[in-house]
Image (cartoon, helix red, strand yellow):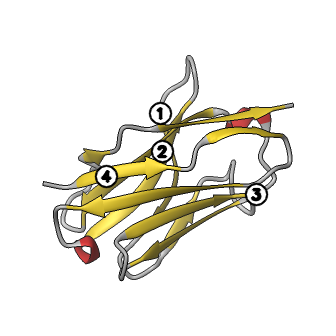
Amino acid sequence: QVQLEESGGGLVQAGDSLRLSCAFSGRTFASYVMGWFRQAPGKERELVAQITPGYSTYEADSVKGRFTLSRDHAKNMVYLQMYMLKPEDTAIYYCAAKHISNSEYGCWGQGTQVTVSS
């Protein structure tokens, strides 16, 4: 089964940058769409960005132009590069995966905390 392990979260100041990493294992990486979700206290989990095996990307309007998602098929890694962080970006960030034949994400990492101070 798919295993996902996030790393790279932390406490930063507004305007700083941070890169989250997600290590994928257990299945064929090239068969999975990879996404990053986040959940802030008292809010619903939201999709931040996703990338297909063919490198097509989607970013939520709230992060467009500030966050960049990439994947490395040689290393089975996904990266979320975050620039110009804002306090409202504070959340637990989750790496997720869905098989290309599935419509829903079914594999989740344990999450990593990102805190942006003003």
Q: Which of marks 3 and 4 is nearer the N terminus?
A: 4
The disc label shown at residue 83, or none: 3
Please tell me whether mark 1 sits on a helix, a strand or a loop. Answer: loop
How packed mark 1 is, by other alpha carbons closer than 10 Å (few <14, some 14-19, many 20 or more), is some
Q: What residue sits right under mark 4 in the picture?
A: 4
Please tell me whether mark 3 sits on a helix, a strand or a loop. Answer: loop
x then y, percent, for residue 80 = 57, 59
Q: Of tags 1 and 3, which is closer to the observer? A: 3
Q: Residue at x 76, y 57 (%)?
A: 83
**Contact (Cβ within 8 Å) of mark 4 with mark 2:** no
Find residue 43 and report its image quarter: top right
Q: What residue sits right under mark 2 in the picture?
A: 37
Residue type marked 2: Phe
Q: Which of marks 4 and 1 is nearer the N terminus?
A: 4
Reply above or below: 96 against 80. above
**Image quarter (top left, top right, bottom left or bottom right) of the C terminus:** top right
How packed mark 3 is, by other alpha carbons closer than 10 Å (few <14, some 14-19, many 20 or more), is some
How packed mark 4 is, by other alpha carbons closer than 10 Å (few <14, some 14-19, many 20 or more), is many
Mark 4 to mark 1: distance in Å?
18 Å
Q: Of tags 4 and 1, which is closer to the observer? A: 4
Q: In this view, does 77 lie to the left or right of 29?
A: right
Q: What residue sits right under mark 1 in the picture?
A: 45
**Contact (Cβ within 8 Å) of mark 2 with mark 1:** yes
Mark 4 to mark 2: distance in Å?
13 Å
Q: Which residue is drawn at 45% across and 79% down?
A: 55
Q: Is residue 62 left or right of residue 104?
A: right
